[in-house]
Image (cartoon, grey):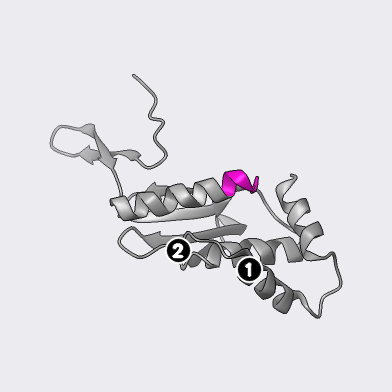
Amino acid sequence: METPTDPNIYHYSTYDSVTGKYIPQTYTPPLQAIGAMNKIRHFIKSNKLPMDIYPIGAQRINFIVKTIVNEPRERRLCKIIMSSTGMFRLGSIMWAPRAILYQAQDWEEIESDFNMEQIKAEWARKCQNEPGPDFETTWNNLINR
C-alpha cells in the first residue's frame, strides 16, 4: 500500500458496525482552503518556521507549532503570526498544555498574505514593556531551532 503524501488530503477510517471492518475515507478541503494552506506552507518553508498546516476530519484545518516554545516573546510571535490568518486558537490543558494550535473550518476564509510589518508592529506593541531581545533576534531564535 502506498503512503499518502499529498498534505492537502486527509486519510482516515470509519468503523462499520455491520461488517465489523474499518472503511478507508478521504477528505479533501475546498480549493480555496487548499490554496490558502499552500501559501501558508510556502511562508513556513521560506522562513524556516517550526509550524505546519494540514486538514483534519470534520471539515477543519489545523495550524500548529511543531515544537514547544517556552520563551515568552517567541510564543507571542508564533501566536501573532498564526492569528494573522484569522484562525481561532485552541488549547488542551490535558493533552497539550503548552501547544500552540489554531484551527478553522474549511469554508472560512483563511488569510495567507502575511504582512510582516503588521506582524512586527503587533509583536512590538505586545512586548513593549517586557525586557528581552528585539524582533530580529527573537525571529532568528524561532527559525533557527
For residue 23, above or below residue 127: above
Give the residue at x 65% y 74%.
Answer: 122
Do the CB atoms of the residues marked 1 and 2 lie less than 8 Å apart? no
Report the quarter where the N terminus lies: top left
The picture places residue 10, in percent across and down from the top left corner, at 35, 41
The residue carrying mark 2 is 111
Front-most of residues 47 and 100: 47
83 sits left or right of 118 in the view: left
Front-most of residues 17 and 13: 13
For residue 119, the mark is 1
Within-10-Å neighbours for mark 1: few <14, some 14–19, many 20+: some
Mark 1 or mark 2, earlier in chain? 2
Query: Any magenta on residue 48?
Result: yes
Give the residue at x 38% y 50%.
Answer: 35
143 sits left or right of 96 in the view: right
Total numbered labels: 2
> Which of the 4 image quadrants contains residue 118?
bottom right
Q: What element carries label 1?
A: helix
For residue 126, above or below residue 93: below
Give the residue at x 30% y 50%.
Answer: 31
The picture places residue 97, in percent across and down from the top left corner, at 61, 60
The picture places residue 76, in percent across and down from the top left corner, at 68, 67
Report the quarter where the C terminus lies: top right
Q: Give the range drawn in magenta.
A: 44-50
| Residue 19 visible to the viewer | yes
**Mark pair 1, 2: CA separation:** 13 Å
Query: Any magenta on residue 16?
Result: no
For residue 21, the mark is none
Question: Could you tell me the amino acid type at mark 2?
Answer: Glu
Within-10-Å neighbours for mark 2: few <14, some 14–19, many 20+: some
The picture places residue 56, in percent across and down from the top left corner, at 38, 49
Front-most of residues 21 and 55: 55
